[in-house]
Amino acid sequence: MGMDNSKYTSSLERLDLFITAVKNNSGSNKPEETDYLRSIFLKAESLQGNAPEWFVLTKGIETALLLEEEVNIGSAAPMAELLYVFSKAGLESLDNIRKEVSDQIFVLVEGLLRVDELYERTHSVESENYRKLLMSMAQDVRVIIVLICEVLFYLRNTSLLTEDRAQEIAREASYLFSPLAHRLGLYKVKSELEDLSMKILHYDIYKDIAKKLNETKRSRDQYIYEFIEPLKRKLEDAGFKFHIKGRTKSIYSIWNKIKKQNTTFEHVYDLFAVRVILDTPYEREKSDCWQVYSILTDQYQPNPKRLRDWLSIPKSNGYESLHTTVMGPGGKWVEVQIRTERMDEIAEKGFAAHFKYKGVKGENNLDSWMANIREILENPESANDQVISEFKMNLYDKEVFIFTPTGDLLHLPKGATILDFAYLIHSRLGNQCVGGRIAGKNVSIRYELNNGDQVEILTSQQQKPKEEWLNIVKTSKAKNRIKSFLREEENENAALGKELLTRRFKNAKIELEESVLAKTIKKMQYKITTEFFRDLGTERLDMQKVKDVYLEILHHDQHPESDYETKSADTFEHVSDLESRASKEDVLTIDSNLKGIQYSLARCCNPIYGDDIFGFILTQGGIKIHRTDCPNAPQMMQRFGYRYVKAKWSGKQGSQYICTLRVIGNDDIGIVTNITSLIQKESSVSMRSISVDSVDGLFQGHISLTVTNIKDIDNIARKIKAIKGVKSVERS
């Protein structure tokens, strides 16, 4: 992988400026630390011509500069990233780094090295690896931010990567690092990660939206100007110091709206937002923002359902702003965000910006966020995919704000219950919770909390957690506490069951052999020994039945000739090792001549000859063929990347394939007849079934077809789309 000299030289020059700036800055770093950094930096010139080290160095330098310029969390994180890559490039030993820099910087270097070791073992996007990755990140929030910036560097420079590696990093960005950036409040970085990963994973859709944005840019800019000018004059007359900017929503967020609203680009009304940013002292921030809101709503009609007040109660990631949507010229809805310079910097740079505003509320949110991350991740016995899904859920959920009886304000995800609130206060309170009292009324543990509720928890000494509680609570903290209690109780019951079995067998003068007991447990269809003993301890399993099965197996082991069975060589069947075989083949070629491997087409995405495909090895044997854009593909790759097999079609396929088209159009008389009539005229396509729903003047139809290849689908979809009244045709 090459790296041109100009790029490398440019990075070194910019790094030199960064080191100078750090040294001149009256921050927490010692001058000798920056001198040490410069001394290693000067060695870098010796690596000219050594491409792999050049790449490592440039990646580290550009990431450090990105941290400094766009995230700005102080100099410790960029310095740690540089020392980490200098160590990777062989320019300095870890022992020397430990001696020369502060503990604060070295802890970050160690965190980055731990993550690097994980990636060297595997690049597979599996939830177990993500759990370990997050565990190492959670030790210091700045390691998370460094990793986010590394991923952003890769996505900005995909020409330096292989296509497969670029796809993999894009999936990681969309699956993990973009949500992390969102949770940290790094909205600018989050938006860029989303757009760049979309550009790689869904290039055609990205290109189409980008083209349409470009075509409408002039009219959009003119409209923003017409909207801003009268507002600008009124704010100037009121004596405010401010600036206003109009911005187009990111391509990814536009795509999200298209999907959520089931609409087209042309029908997404809020393609842009206007931001009013005030230059005002901290003590006047709230009053000035509300005054600007008053001026804005005097000028334009507001939509009362679209007011969002994050001034009074900021988001848990520190975000503060006032959002509203108003009716602009020409009857178009426009989203307007009102905030101060301080709020805007926090919105762009996240928690890092809080370091610049000591004494301003919100500083402690960083600690609570880190505590939440640890709470989710510190339970290694949880199912890993469940941990990740809960983690993602907690990242994106909206919040409700609740008061304790003493008036303290706490926040939980929307949908959280009385039981979640009890566990938030204390584990013992949660374990003994029987309900709550709100506004003088008793409510059950299932009661979903609303904004502004003042909650008193009711308890009982006789109450204890039950398994069904896991379906009541929403937060990871509550789930982990309930699981922990149930696990302890299960272990106690298992110990009781084991002691009971030993005593009963001893009384019956039956010798307890571990190997025979293991076979007994298996024959009684228990996969986990603890569950077997637990059921004995709780008397859900009959002791006499266990004794009968045990004695039967013991007799068989002592007299194996009694039911010895021979098998003919004719009936012997050898099952091939698909995973081993698949790993030795570069690409699995799907055609009628494929021998020795059973495969079938996945129903979730119905691949057709001509689609880009991959194989997925099943645990029970065989391979399932999926489209590369199958909605289940990202999850399968993340959890079971080692079972992925490259695949392609070969030869001319004579098979018939099933495909479903989703058609949306005006609910006009005869439109369905026109569609079915058109399909019947096609010699290579036959219709299997059609179902149609009609809502608010629109019809939505699902048409099941039999085709021979993807060209048939493209051809019939194009013809259906040309029918008058049809709005969209998509393959589902």
Image (cartoon, rainbow, N blue to C red):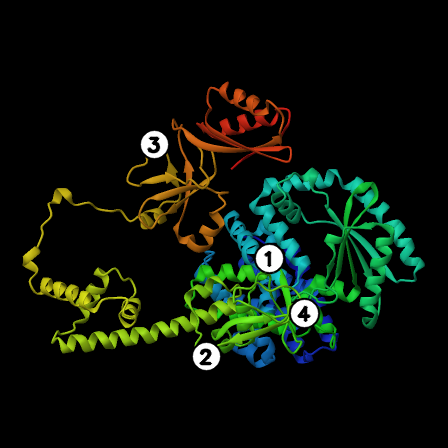
Separation (CA) of disc 1 from disc 3: 43 Å
Tell me which label, 4 or 3, sits earlier in the chain: 4
Q: Nearer the N terminus, badge 2 or badge 4?
A: 4
Residue type highlighted by circle 2: Gln
Q: What residue does disc 2 label? A: 461
Above/below status of 242 relative to 703: below
Residue 160 against residue 69 in the figure, above or below: above
In this orientation, which residue lies closer to the viewer: 583 or 460? Answer: 460
Front-lying residue, 292 or 593: 292
Q: Residue at x 48, y 64 (%)?
A: 131
Which corner quadrant of the image does residue 291 belong to? bottom right
Q: Residues within 10 Å of mark 1 (few under 14, many from 20)?
A: many
Q: Which mark sits nearer the N-terminus, 1 or 4? A: 4
Q: Mark 4 points at which residue?
A: 73
Q: Residue 414 carries which label?
A: none
> Within 10 Å of the Cα at label 3, are there few (<14), some (14-19), or many (20+) other Cα atoms?
few
Position of residue 68 relative to residue 275, above or below, is below
Mark 3 or 2, which is nearer the eye?
A: 2
Amino acid bearing label 4: Ile
Q: Which of marks 2 and 4 is in front?
A: 2
Q: Which of marks 1 and 2 is nearer the N terminus?
A: 1
Distance Cα–Cα, label 3 vs label 2: 68 Å
**Which residue is denoted by mark 1 in the rendering?**
178
Residue 72 screen position, x and y as percent:
69, 67
Please tell me the numbered disc located at residue 592.
3
Q: What residue type is labelled 1?
A: Ser
Report the front residue among 417 and 329: 417
